Image: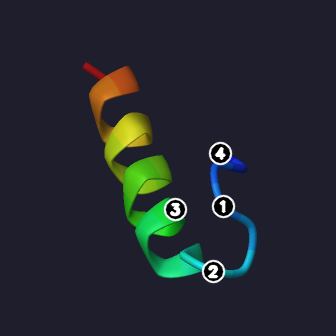
Amino acid sequence: TMVCTGCCATLDHIVTYLFKQLSQK
């Protein structure tokens, strides 16, 4: 996702990871 480029890249990465995990189920 591109919710907040730069200012919260770590949080964005976590959200993307969780989204991928949920998509596999």
Q: Secondary structure at mark 3?
A: helix
Q: Nearer the viewer, mark 1 or mark 3?
A: 1
Q: Secondary structure at mark 4?
A: loop
Q: Determine which residue is flagged by label 3.
A: 12
The reply to whether callout 1 and callout 2 are in contact (CB within 8 Å) is yes
x and y, in percent, of residue 4 in the image: 66, 61
Numbered mark located on residue 7 in the image: 2
- Closest to the camera, between mark 3 and mark 2, is 2
Q: Secondary structure at mark 2?
A: loop
Q: Could you tell me residue 1's position as x and y percent? A: 65, 45
Look at the picture and state if 5 lies above or below 24.
Answer: below
Coloring applied to the structure? rainbow
Taking depth in this image into account, of 6 and 23 the one nearest to the observer is: 6
**Residue kind at label 3, given as amino acid type:** Asp
Which residue position is annotated with label 1?
4
Distance between the Cα atoms at labels 1 and 2? Answer: 6 Å
**Alpha-carbon span between mark 3 and mark 4:** 7 Å
9 horizontally vs 11: left or right: right
Q: Residue 1 got which mark?
A: 4
The structure residue drawn at horizontal position 49% and vertical position 50%, both measured from the top left corner, is: 16
